[in-house]
Image (cartoon, rainbow, N blue to C red):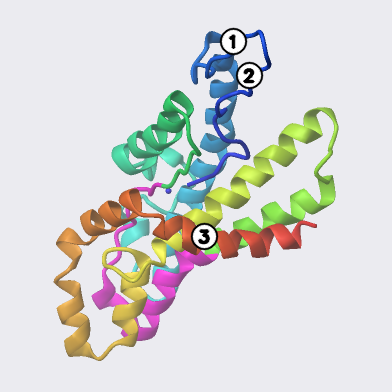
């Protein structure tokens, strides 16, 4: 699980005659309260997004006959049951803090601890696999739509506490768009890989499943070293931002 900030780190400031200007330090002490506010603004919608994402997988699996998530206590709104130490805490914190410290545009994404699903218990199995996989990203799209509705109701110039709520809704919109698009990448073990496997012939799906042990490593290397995810997320965010106008 991920967000963009609205601003960019300051570039070199124009130098009028007779005065010397230098590039501002990215993490001056005065920026610390802003940093804390940025973290809080992303942390709240991120936790909500990943918890409901995983809860949706487990709930849909139960509809199709697999109660594994319920049996293991994962059909709960308690975030501690879903937090993955690396995907929910370490990676998002690093991606958010690094640009704020060194300059640049933050881009955050992450994931929660996967809900256990026994696909052999799904009936019908192929349709169940498809809809269980789509339930998580679908929930993120619904949350992005709800966030757009809040933005539309409050407006971009909401005063006082309502302004903070509007900023939280904007962060939620971005987080959920990034989570949905990231999870729909067609590589196992991501949801997009499950969707692809459910649509492919059985033999091809089994071959695709062999990618799963290294799939997340490949995805992270591509996402962190290219602009692929940003390129895919941009039109999706544009659609939801359009709904908020």
Residue assigned mark 2? 15
Query: Against 227, is 10 above or below?
Result: above
Residue assigned mark 1? 20
Query: Against 44, is 66 above or below?
Result: below
Camera-nearest residue between 163 and 116 = 163
Region in magenta: 110-138
For the question of whether residue 124 can be seen, the reply is no
Q: Earlier in the sequence, mark 3 or mark 1?
A: 1
Q: Is residue 23 left or right of residue 195?
A: right
Query: Against 57, is 42 above or below?
Result: above
User: Measured from the top left, where is residue 33 in percent x and y?
Assistant: 59, 16
User: Measured from the top left, where is residue 240 in percent x and y?
Assistant: 67, 61
Identify the residue at image location x=66%, y=8%: 18
Identify the residue at image location x=52%, y=12%: 28
Residue assigned mark 3? 233
Q: Secondary structure at mark 3?
A: helix
Q: Quadrant of residue 57?
A: bottom left
- Indicate which label's residue lies in the foreground, 3 or 2: 2
Quadrant holding the C terminus: bottom right
Q: Secondary structure at mark 1?
A: loop
Instruction: Measure the C-alpha gap from mark 3 to mark 2.
Output: 37 Å
Question: Looking at the image, do the residues carrying marks 3 and 1 touch, with CB atoms under 8 Å apart?
Answer: no
Q: Residues within 10 Å of mark 3 (few under 14, many from 20)?
A: some
């Amino acid at each position: 699980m991920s967000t963009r900030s609205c601003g960019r780190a300051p570039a070199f400031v124009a130098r009028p005659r007779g005065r010397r200007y230098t590039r501002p330090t990215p993490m001056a002490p005065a920026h610390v309260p802003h940093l804390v506010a940025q973290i809080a603004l992303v942390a709240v919608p991120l936790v909500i997004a990943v918890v409901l994402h995983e809860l949706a997988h487990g709930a849909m699996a139960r509809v199709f006959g697999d109660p594994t998530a319920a049996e293991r206590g994962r059909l709960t709104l308690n975030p501690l049951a879903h937090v993955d130490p690396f995907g929910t805490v370490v990676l998002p914190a690093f991606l958010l803090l690094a640009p704020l410290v060194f300059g640049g545009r933050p881009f955050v994404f992450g994931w929660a601890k996967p809900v256990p699903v026994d696909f052999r218990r799904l009936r019908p199995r192929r349709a169940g696999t498809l809809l269980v996989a789509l339930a998580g990203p679908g929930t993120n799209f619904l949350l992005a739509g709800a966030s757009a509705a809040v933005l539309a109701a409050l407006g971009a110039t909401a005063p006082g506490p309502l302004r903070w709520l509007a900023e939280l809704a904007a962060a939620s919109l971005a987080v959920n768009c990034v989570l949905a698009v990231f999870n729909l990448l067609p590589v196992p073990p991501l949801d997009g890989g499950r969707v692809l496997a459910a649509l492919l012939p059985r033999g091809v799906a089994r071959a695709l499943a062999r990618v799963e042990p290294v799939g997340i490593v490949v995805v992270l290397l591509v996402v962190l070293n290219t602009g692929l995810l940003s390129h895919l997320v941009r039109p999706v965010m544009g659609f939801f931002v359009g709904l908020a106008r």
